[in-house]
C-alpha cells in the first residue's frame, strides 16, 4: 500500500537538510544534499510507517501542505512510501506426492521454499 506524507525540509548552513514529518512526531532524517535528503526522507518514512504498522498502531492521516508553517529556509515536499503487508496468509497448494515426500525427508520447509521461489520470480 502506498502512503504519501508531507515532509518539512529545513536547509542548513552547510548545504545539508534536516527532514521532519509534522504528522509523525519523532520521525526525523538528514541528507547531505537535496537529492540525498529526498532519498533519506523516503527511507525514514517507510521505516517509521512499517514500525507503526508492525506494532498495531494506527497510521495518522496526512496533513495538507497548506496547513504546514514554514520559515524562509524551509519548504514542504510530499514523500511516498510503499509499505508491504508481511502478515502470513494460508494458501492451499497442490504438489505431487513424490515432491511432498522429498520435502519431508529433507527437513525443508515447503513454505520457505515457496516464499523464496516467489520472491525470486517476482523481483
Image (cartoon, rainbow, N blue to C red):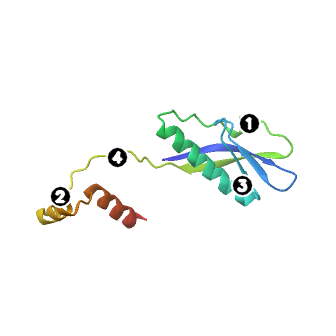
Disc 4 on helix, strand or loop? loop
Task: Tell me if residue 38 comes above or below residue 3 in the rendering.
Answer: below
**Alpha carbon separation for disc pair 1 and 3:** 19 Å
- The image shows residue 13 at horizontal and vertical percentages of 88, 52
**Mark before the other along the chain sequence, 3 or 4:** 3
Question: Who comes first in sequence, dot 4 or dot 1?
Answer: 1
Give the labeled residue for mark 2: 94
Question: Relative to residue 71, is residue 112 drawn left or right?
Answer: left
Q: Badge 2 local density, few (<14 within 10 Å), some, or many (20+)?
A: few
Mark 2–mark 3 distance (CA, rounded to whole Å): 47 Å
For residue 44, the mark is none
- Residue at the disc numbered 4: 88
The residue drawn where x is 27% and y is 46% is 90
**Marks 2 and 3 in Cβ contact (< 8 Å):** no
The residue under label 1 is 68
- Label 3 vs label 4, nearer the camera: 4
Q: Is residue 49 left or right of residue 27?
A: left
Q: Nearer the viewer, mark 1 or mark 3?
A: 3
Residue indicated by mark 3? 37
Residue at 25% over, 58% down: 110
Q: Which residue is more in the foreground, 2 or 93?
A: 93
Mark 4–mark 2 Cα distance, whole angstroms, equals 18 Å
Amino acid at each position: 500500500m502506498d502512503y504519501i506524507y508531507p515532509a518539512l525540509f529545513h536547509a542548513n548552513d552547510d548545504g545539508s537538510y534536516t527532514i521532519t514529518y509534522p504528522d509523525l512526531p519523532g520521525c526525523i532524517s538528514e541528507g547531505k544534499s537535496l537529492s540525498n535528503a529526498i532519498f533519506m526522507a523516503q527511507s525514514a518514512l517507510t521505516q517509521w510507517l512499517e514500525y507503526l504498522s508492525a506494532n498495531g498502531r494506527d497510521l495518522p492521516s496526512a496533513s495538507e501542505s497548506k496547513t504546514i508553517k514554514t520559515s524562509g529556509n524551509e519548504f514542504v515536499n510530499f514523500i511516498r512510501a510503499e509499505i508491504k503487508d508481511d502478515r502470513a496468509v494460508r494458501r492451499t497448494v497442490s504438489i505431487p506426492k513424490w515432491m511432498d515426500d522429498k520435502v519431508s525427508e529433507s527437513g525443508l520447509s515447503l513454505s520457505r521454499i515457496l516464499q523464496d521461489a516467489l520472491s525470486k520470480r517476482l523481483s
